[in-house]
């Protein structure tokens, strides 16, 4: 006897969990498409050659690779950017700029821990082939409108640019070959104390108290200038910000923040992270401009800007900030019960009538079950309403509607039920 | 230099191909949920133990299995029914009946050929835990309403039952241990001549000319009775049919057909296949009742009925019967061009205004491109409209709208554009 269990590090999503995931995915797709992004899907398996050596040795160790029955070395996609780079090489006919979104699982053999799984869904949007600040601004506007439409109000997009960071590091006298290492340290500002960051930079032989005496002061200085005159010191970033506001983003939700550096080496221009207040889960949407990465990943030489929205984190944020509480946990609106075998047809007809009004309707499937059992079933599935046609209702052409939350019930004319349920 | 190529037997779906796939998936989900089916998602990887030995040796050879880095034997899901059986064993708290749908890829190391891929998407709906003919009828009604909503009118659901087939084989004097083999032969009636089927049964030592002299005659007899009195000879199947009609299925689209047997051994009651006329692609939705399979697959002992809708086949059928021709191949409705750097802001504002009316709007991302280049871009992406704000339009608060199909263009007040584009 084989034990029924989900593979370690992987997850099942039962119907009540899927309701919120589907809502998020549907909303993201809507907003992506409103901004002219179109969907791409790539397969789960790729030639291992396509996947290996793209993000360094540590990443290679996380790849799921194996030999298929034809002796090919294959692997499961590690992210959605490497397949994108392959697609850009392979289909030269794609119109440029290529604005694509992709919502698919990626696979990494990480040590599973809270919030980290071996299969996880990323929602990526990227604009390939444009060097215009309009394209950076659009990506940021998509994040804003997506979060707004999901019901978030209290969130902040923190905006910065590599050029601003480069200027700060120059002013601090840091040698250019130490810039990436410095940025990786600055990236930890949210998680570590200033003393710890000083120690870290000292250990990396960047200089003693470099963070507290110089970098931090320089960041504060740039930050202060911004408050005064809305100038980041970087012309490109200023244009991005201006366009973001023109696109309808509320100034309360976006903030220039020179301490927001993304730790990843490949960014070349604007970078951004998005934090939902009252949700202690890190950035829900991070990204930036990466003009050399597509080529480094084996694709053509094309400028690019994009973001990843983490589906799990957004769903978690919705739970933590109660966005999801007002929503039902079932996609079904009403359970049509069956009072008795003789009255079965009445219930079948009613279920059809409700569906023809596009109301999600479950017909109870056992004509011999007691009404109490049917009500319990509706409760266990969190279906908000139950409709009952007993002998009286059948005679009078009415229906009894029970609200499963308030436990109130009322009798109404049969033809009024669709309206009642769509209110 | 690594060659950019899709893994053999796998596919990329570029944006123009995704439009129709998304439309089909969205419609199927709508109809599934209207009938009270709720979504389940299971991971791509399972313990190999969960997958192996479920459909016989031949199927095991098609499994993608390998050892992960932790030394676990794992595999990619072969279908969606084995993971369903695992879920049913694992989560005893699931309310019964469990009406779930699942739309996910499955993976089989088949020899790739036209229409057969190593990764393919199945749309499964199943009702687990009900022995009522209502549940069989619902599955069939879902197929009907899904195809109708996708725009198909000319299709036929062929309905039969194992019990009818058993009666026919009994009357032909076929021993019970030969029934499955006989059904596998009868299942080929669409593809082979009567002589070939006779030969096949003879080779399997079932008897000479058994098909032409006996089975075929018996099938015709049962078929004829149906025409006369709507009685299949099987009480359960009669109830299913009656309920299907009560649920609103048009009698033109469903037909009792005693030669429709599904070749698979595990069916125990009603079986059905669905054919779209004018599309030469086999059944787009097949299924039936399988009361022992869930247990055989390692799940609990529960009755079940369900169907698989093949996403690829439905998309092919839409193309072959021109359902998709009237649809645009882009999700984007309009490209807002940029006339010149000075007029960029006007275009940015217009794109925002259109999006706030939920119109899918792409803003052209290069303020220095000639209008001709921008029109060509819209053509290459099959975007149906282009909006232009030049100096005159800016002065008069108007916009020029070009229909890319008719090549006609007209000038209209800026505030009228959203209405014009949602018509």
Image (cartoon, coloured by chain):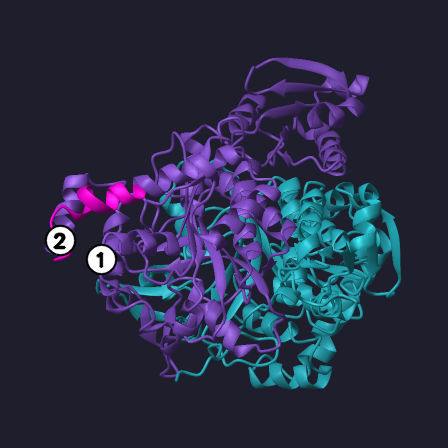
Chain colours: A purple, B cyan
**Residue B423 visible, this orientation:** no
- In percent of width and height, residue B276 lies at 76, 65
Which chain does the numbered disc 2 sit on?
A
* Residue at point 73%, 46% (across, down): B244
Position in image of residue B27 (x %, y %): 68, 51
* Image quadrant where residue A296 sits: bottom left
Discs 2, 1: same chain = yes
State yes or no: residue A207 in magenta: yes
How far apart, in angstroms, are the residues tagged by discs 2 and 1? 9 Å
Q: Mark 1 points at which residue?
A: A174
Horizontal side, residue A125 vs residue B34: left or right: left
Closest to the observer, A30 or A120: A30
Picture layout, residue A406 above or below residue B44 = above
Element under label 2?
Answer: loop
Res. B364 in view:
yes
Q: Which of B172 and B245 is in front in this view?
A: B245
Question: Which sits in the foreground, B337 or B354?
Answer: B337
- Magenta stretch, residue numbers: A205-219
Instruction: Please name the residue shown 21% across and 41% down the image.
Output: A192
Magenta span: predominant SS is: helix
Q: Is mark 1 on a helix, strand or loop?
A: loop
The reply to whether the C-beta atoms of the residues labelled 2 and 1 are less than 8 Å apart is yes
Q: In the rendered image, which residue does mark 2 sit on?
A: A207
Mark 2 or mark 1, which has the lower sequence index?
Answer: 1
Q: Does the magenta stretch include residue A162?
A: no
| Mark 2 residue crowding within 10 angstroms, few (<14) / some (14–19) / many (20+) | some
Tell me: residue A297, above or below residue A288: below
Chain name for mark 1: A
């Amino acid at each position: 006897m084989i034990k029924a269990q989900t593979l370690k590090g992987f997850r099942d999503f039962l119907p009540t969990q899927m309701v919120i995931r589907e809502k998020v995915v549907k909303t993201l797709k809507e907003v992506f498409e409103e901004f002219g992004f179109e969907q791409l899907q790539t397969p789960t398996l790729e030639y291992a050659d396509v996947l290996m050596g793209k993000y360094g040795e540590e990443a290679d160790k996380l790849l799921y690779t194996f030999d298929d029955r034809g002796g090919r070395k294959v692997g499961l996609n590690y992210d959605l950017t490497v397949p994108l780079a392959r697609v850009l090489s392979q289909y030269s006919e794609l119109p440029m700029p290529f604005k694509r979104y992709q919502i698919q699982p990626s696979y990494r053999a990480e040590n599973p821990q809270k919030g980290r799984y071996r299969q996880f869904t990323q929602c990526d949007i990227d604009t390939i082939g444009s060097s215009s600040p309009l394209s950076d601004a659009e990506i940021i506007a998509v994040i804003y409108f997506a979060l707004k439409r999901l019901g978030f109000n209290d969130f902040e997009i923190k905006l910065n640019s590599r050029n601003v960071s480069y200027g700060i590091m120059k002013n601090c006298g840091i040698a250019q070959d130490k810039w990436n290492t410095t940025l990786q340290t600055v990236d930890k500002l949210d998680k570590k104390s200033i003393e710890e960051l000083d120690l870290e930079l000292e250990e990396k032989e960047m200089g003693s108290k470099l963070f507290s005496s110089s970098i931090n002061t320089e960041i504060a200085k740039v930050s202060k200038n911004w408050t005064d005159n809305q100038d980041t010191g970087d012309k490109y970033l200023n244009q991005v910000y201006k366009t973001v506001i023109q696109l309808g983003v509320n100034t309360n939700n976006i903030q220039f923040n020179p301490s927001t550096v993304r730790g990843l080496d490949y960014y070349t221009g604007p970078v951004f992270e998005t934090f939902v207040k009252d949700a202690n889960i890190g950035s829900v949407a991070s990204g930036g401009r990466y003009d050399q990465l597509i080529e480094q990943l084996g694709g053509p030489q094309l400028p690019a800007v994009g973001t990843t929205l983490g589906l799990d984190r957004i769903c978690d944020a919705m739970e933590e900030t109660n966005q999801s509480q007002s929503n039902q946990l079932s996609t079904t609106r009403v359970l049509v019960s069956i009072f008795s075998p003789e009255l079965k047809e009445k219930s079948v007809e009613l279920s059809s009538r409700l569906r023809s009004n596009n109301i999600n309707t479950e017909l109870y499937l056992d004509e011999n079950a007691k009404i109490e059992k049917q009500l319990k079933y509706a409760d266990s599935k969190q279906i908000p309403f139950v409709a009952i046609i007993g002998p009286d209702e059948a005679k009078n052409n009415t229906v009894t509607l029970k609200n499963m939350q308030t436990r109130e019930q009322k009798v109404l004319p049969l033809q009024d039920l669709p309206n009642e349920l769509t209110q």
